Amino acid sequence: MKTFLVYLLISYPLSMAMAQFEPNYDERQVPEFKIPDPLTTFDGKKITATSEWENTRRPELYQFFEEQVYGKVPGKLDSLSFNMVETSDDALNGKAQRKQVEVSLFKNGKSLDFNILLYLPKSRKPAPIFLGYNFYGNHSITDDPNVIVSKAWAMDSEEFGISGHTLTEASRGVRVHRWALEKIIDGGFGLATIYYGEVDPDKNDFSDGLHSLFYMESQEIPKKDEWGSIAAWAFGMSRALDYLETDPDIDASHVVSFGHSRLGKAALWAGASDTRFAGVISNDSGCGGAALSKRQVGETVGRINTSFPHWFCDNFTEYNENEEALPVDQHELLALIAPRPLYVASAEDDQWADPRGEFLSAHYATSVYDLYGTKGISDTKMPEVNSPVQNTLAYHIRTGKHDVTEYDWEQYIDWAKRFVAVKP
Ligand code: GTR
């Protein structure tokens, strides 16, 4: 009896803690909740005109996401500079121009460098661009031997031959399949990519990366409402856009921020926080990205803040196991991008990212696209797999797993031709 009691005392709290983190995939277990209305202000005023959206509602929503979810950028850079490190007119069998540009950011006597790898179609100048981070270094997205291997900290990966947190030749080309580079070039677009670890290493350590440049004296971590890594990556995308604006080979008024998964969250926040981005693509961005948090399907706010304590600002932990208290949901992040083109994509086997929650989020953001007279996802029923719905706000769910595939890129290129950078 005594041992049984001891067993109960130990195992009960443990199993409760585990139960909290047991992911739900059952639609019947989704809690009932009211979708916050993008077109009603926090104090209950209805928004009926784009001017009211732009002057009242959008700023208050933006402020909420900035202070309570992703975190504020604490101040401005002192300066930044661009340095062309390498260039060739004979990339991809002569079809493309390659450029490798080092961007240096300066603040408080400190600096940080990151490198943009660019492939530009020779057939179209200036070229519209897809700009997105990669997970394992610029050299991982292509077999091109001329792409410089980053010296920045990297996540170890047995699969890709990465150990000691150091990138080497072993990982050249390991992520070719995620970047349909030839199709992008043939479609008349350029690709700009950056290794995300150069902007902020993806670990729960705020002593390095972009954050450290902005600290006040004796500050060691961001304040509760200051940026986590996602906001730092988004900031890096904006600084890359600063460079793109200076390059005459690039049509900087047609740059689409693109990202997969955690980097899809960053692409969305970049698009929301910097309206110079002409369009946004969220590929399988899931929790804290396109998926509705209040559904609590797959990854939840509590779970993501526990596994990745450095991604969001500290204030966001208020909503751990407490999603019902959120006065917003992620469809309102999507709405911040309106009326600019936005593509939300899911994968059927990526239940962790809650495909239905990503779809519904696009659907519930549609009222703001409607307000501008642009088309979104008006249907409440999810489309069949591999049957994209492409409007200014687009959505697809494809077969397969959490990944970026050739199929995804085919849709993005087609859609971007129709809605982002229409050829004259
Ligand atoms: C997972 C995380 C997701 C998603 C993913 C990724 O571990 O739970 O939110 O960001 O990583 O980035 O691949």
Image (cartoon, grey):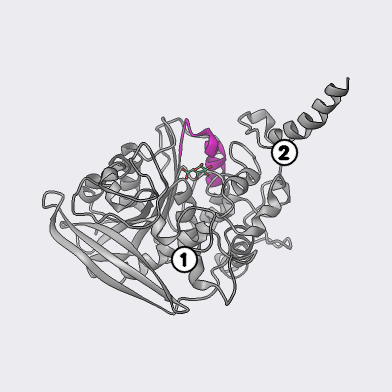
In this view, the mark in front (2 or 1): 1
The crowding category of the residue bearing disc 2, from other C-alpha atoms within 10 Å (few below 14, some 14 to 19, many at least 20), is: few
Name which of mark 2 and mark 1 comes first in the sequence. 2
Residue 183 image position (x, y, % from top left): 24, 45
Q: Is mark 2 within 8 Å of ligand 1?
A: no
Specify whether 328 is left or right of 97.
right
Residue assigned mark 1: 210
Residue at (59% x, 71% y) in the render: 219
Residue 371 shows in this picture: no
Quadrant location, the N terminus:
top right
Q: Any mark on residue 133, and which? A: none
Residue 63 image position (x, y, % from top left): 61, 65
Residue 3 image position (x, y, % from top left): 84, 23
**What's drawn in magenta, residue-wise?**
346-363
Position above or below: 49 against 268: below
Q: Are marks 2 and 1 in contact (CB under 8 Å)?
A: no
The CA distance from mark 2 to mark 1 is 40 Å
Specify whether 48 is left or right of 416.
right
Residue assigned mark 2: 32
Residue 301 shows in this picture: yes
> Magenta segment, principal secondary structure?
helix
